Image (cartoon, helix red, strand yellow):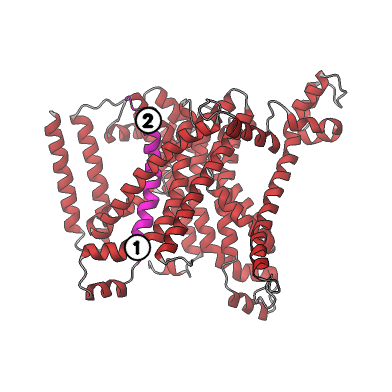
Amino acid sequence: MTDAPIAAPGAGIGATGRALRRITGAAAPILTIVAGIIALWYIAVVPMNMHAAASQAERDGIPVAPDTAIARQELTGTSLALRNTGIIPQTFNQDRPRLPSPHQVAAELWDTIALKRVTSKRSLVYHGWVTVSATLLGFAIGTGLGILLAVGIVYSRAMDLSIMPWAIASQTVPILAVAPMVIVMLGAIGIQGLFPKAMIAAYLSFFPVVVGMVKGLRSPDAMQLDLLRTYSASRLQEFLKLRLPASAPYLFASLKIGIAASLVGTIVGELPTGARAGLGARMLVGDQFGQPLVAWAALFAAAIAAALLVGALALIERATLRRMGIAPA
Amino acid sequence: MSPPAALLIALAIWAAGWGLNVVLSRHPERRWVRLAVPAIFGLTLLLIWEHLVRALGVSGVILPPPSAIAARFASETSILWADFQQTILKGALPGYAFGAIAAFIVAIFADRSDFLRRGILPVGSFMAALPIVGIAPIFVKWLGNDWESKAAVVGVMVFFPILVNTVAGLKSADAMQRDLMRTYGAGYWTSLAKLRLPAAMPFIFNGLKISTTLALIGAIVAEFFGSPTVGMGFRISTSVGQLALDMVWAEIVVAALAGSAFYGAVAIIERAITFWHPSQRARS
């Protein structure tokens, strides 16, 4: 509500204090939200796991309020928890919880990322690499083809009119949903392993790059193009010295969308196809063989992978744009 | 037909279609040209597909020709319609509505406090980039095989893009405009209804449009992990098992049509509501 910062936050503090203030000022709200989410998660764990905890307590000879499992089935997890407050702590540390608690997931993540050998089949680094390598290969193919097509579209009116409507319309088609089937079909004709997943990843990063890159290559205005014409620049020079540099911010914006889409595509491609390695495979294995911790750890590992990939691109973007003088140093 | 001859004919079809487009696109200012050129391009690709599959004798188990897909589509409309109802009308749409309303309420809360907004915006945009669809197996296990689990997956998937866009939109009204509202003596809710909500509409619709595709993806993918014996995801996975690829493609056509129709419907509503926005006026 402070539209006019007469006394801006940190106005009276020195330069280092201000910098510190800025970092904590950005981090504090984020940390609060994250803490809130974790707190909600812990609260949700209790009713989700209460029935299992009550049954376990009954087997251990601890009195439970409705003393038969059938009677307990009638109650919701919340009311069961309210009647048996004594066994609530046990909901947080079950072996096979319906909803694992945050510290269990964190422990599983630490165990499978840091403590397992990278080559082990139980290491999430191993599975993560299977997924990320397919993602990166597909992303590279999709981005390369996307940039080429964008150049074609900008310089050929026939390509523009023919392809652009399809490129835009293709964004509304839930093609990701049939990704597993594409992998099954390619598997049926003998193409297996990295390549089918990479094709899905390539397809998904392709169109965001085309659309963003076309916008970027067209971003120089008439004045700038006229200036180059007065220099009697050739079309190649116009492309290299004006259009290509001008497209960089647009390209990076699409790259960040594209790599996130590629990763999702690879994971969905691994999910229901019986893949043995990869984060998607871990999610499914954990779910089907009653190891919810494995599934949840894979889910969070996928989140970490996405954050690392997008973060890496953001760093490259900042360095490049700074180097080019587009972003403030 | 021998493969070289088949390829030669395919090239001829391509050259004819492309040549026609090159000629037509010399007059891009004509409205019918803008419609005809992409249509010809699509038709050319379909023709080449049909021709190559037939001429080279590609098995229908690998790639059925478009005509077979169309025939399957026409003969199985009742099954396709039942799948559409189960997946889109029962799974995707309720989940989409639920996720959008939840996102909207949280966004209003976030908007009331600058602190909350600075927390929710980065966390939300981080969540929006995550492969949330991975929760599908977990949700199917929790909520059972029917449409409830699909709607829940869809709700979570569409929540974050809509939330981030709504929060960003609600602060898009600039300081001058907000000052003007204050000089009118408008309170929080009045300025929300008269200024900031209308100003946020282009952002909100951006989120809503992105989420239409996500909703269909979530609903279909969740069906791979358990569903009643009806639904697009169910049909796709069982048809692949039976090697009935023409049925798989027919479902893909349904998904494409449903996706475009859903997106188009949201875009039409957007046009009616944000008619004042430059991006909408430029077109007419």
How many numbered badges does the structure rendering display?
A: 2
Q: Residue at x 42, y 59 (%)?
A: A320
- Quadrant where the N terminus of chain B is found in the figure: top left
**In which quadrant will I find the C terminus of chain B?**
bottom left
Q: Residue at x 27, y 75 (%)?
A: A227
Q: Position of residue B2 (x, y in %)?
A: 12, 28
- Which residue corresponds to mark 1? A245
Q: Amino acid at mark 1?
A: Pro
Q: Residue at x 33, y 64 (%)?
A: A218
Query: Image point 52% across, 25% down: which residue?
Result: A121
Disc 2/disc 1 C-alpha distance (Å)? 46 Å
Query: Which is more toward the observer, A213 or A70?
Result: A213
Tell me the mark number nearer the camera, choosing from 2 and 1.
1
Q: Position of residue A196 (x, y in %)?
A: 37, 33
The chain carrying label 1 is A
Q: Tell me the chief SS of the magenta region.
A: helix
Boundaries of the magenta span: A190-219
Judging from the image, what secondary structure is the residue with disc 1 in? helix
Q: Please state if B93 lies on the left or on the right of A233 as rendered.
A: right
**Residue B247 numbered mark, or none:** 2
> With A18 as the anchor, is A88 left or right in this view?
right
Task: Estimate the x, y position of residue A66 in percent, counting from the top left.
Answer: 85, 25
